[in-house]
Image (cartoon, rainbow, N blue to C red):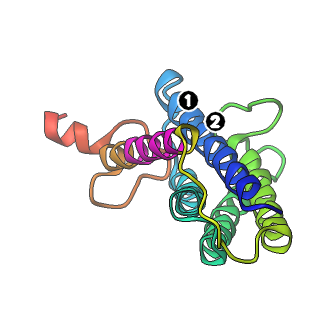
């Protein structure tokens, strides 16, 4: 596979990861659905996957960047699978509202599996080494910038929700903001 096509696939995948984080962030504020600790771990997994993609976009395709993506997908997938296991028993209910028939944590597990599969395909079919440099175009830089904003936003939101301590199992408010405001 030519380096340019691998670069474009990495840009598109980074945009997809950014939109996953954006949608989770939107749901958090629009629906007041604060993420639980396992949800935050899944977001961290997406951030690690996105970091590997961003490195591929900025520095060129490299197997080490794909390795980072695999580690993030396995860690995030484990958190998602743990949450699926918590709610698989009939009558236990789910966490959050379903989206297109499945809860976010179920979708997260599916997406992490897709990342593992896609990364494996790129490792097998992609360029063996990034000998030709791809010019960093506007779409790639836009994807990296969007990812950086989503990562920063989710990080600030997590800090506001949990403060510097452990996150509550079933969050109902932003603890750090509550303590700042004296609530």
User: As drawn, which residue projects farthest toward the front?
Assistant: 132
The magenta stretch spans which residues? 141-154
Residue 133 horizontal/vertical position (percent): 59, 63
Query: Which residue occupies 59% across, 33% down?
Result: 23
In space, the residues marked 1 and 2 are separated at their CA atoms by 10 Å
The percent coordinates of residue 99 (x first, y second) are 74, 31
Q: Which mark is residue 95?
A: none
| Callout 2 secondary element | loop
In this rendering, the answer to whether 71 lies above or below 79 is: below
Nearer to the camera, 23 or 141: 141
Mark 1 = which residue? 27
Quadrant containing the C terminus is top left
Vertical position of residue 83 compared to residue 178: above or below: below
Q: Position of residue 82 (x, y in %)?
A: 69, 63
Left or right of residue 46: residue 162 = left
Magenta-colored segment: predominant secondary structure: helix
Q: Nearer the viewer, residue 7 or 63?
A: 7
Q: Earlier in the sequence, mark 1 or mark 2?
A: 1
Q: Any magenta on residue 55? A: no
Q: State the residue in front, 98 or 142.
A: 142
Q: Is residue 144 magenta?
A: yes
Q: On the image, numbered disc 2 is attached to which residue? A: 96
As drawn, is 170 to the left or to the right of 5? Answer: left
In screen coordinates, is 39 left or right of 78?
left
Q: Could you tell me which residue is drawn at 43 percent across and 44 percent down?
A: 154
Q: Quadrant of residue 177?
A: top left
Does residue 2 appear anywhere in the picture? yes
């Amino acid at each position: 596979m030519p380096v340019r096509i691998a670069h474009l696939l990495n840009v598109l995948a980074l945009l997809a990861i950014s939109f996953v984080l954006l949608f989770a962030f939107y749901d958090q504020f629009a629906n007041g659905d604060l993420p639980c600790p396992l949800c935050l771990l899944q977001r961290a997994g997406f951030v690690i996957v996105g970091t590997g993609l961003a490195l591929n976009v900025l520095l060129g395709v490299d197997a080490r960047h794909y390795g980072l993506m695999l580690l993030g997908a396995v860690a995030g997938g484990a958190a998602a699978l743990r949450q699926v296991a918590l709610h698989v028993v009939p009558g236990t209910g789910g966490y959050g509202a379903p989206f297109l028939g499945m809860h976010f944590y179920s979708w997260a597990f599916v997406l992490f599996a897709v990342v593992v599969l896609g990364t494996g395909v790129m490792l097998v079919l992609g360029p063996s080494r990034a000998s030709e440099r791809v010019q960093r175009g506007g779409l790639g830089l836009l994807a990296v910038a969007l990812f950086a904003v989503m990562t920063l936003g989710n990080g600030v939101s997590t800090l506001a929700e949990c403060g510097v301590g452990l996150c509550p199992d079933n969050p109902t408010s932003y603890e750090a903001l509550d303590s700042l405001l004296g609530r």
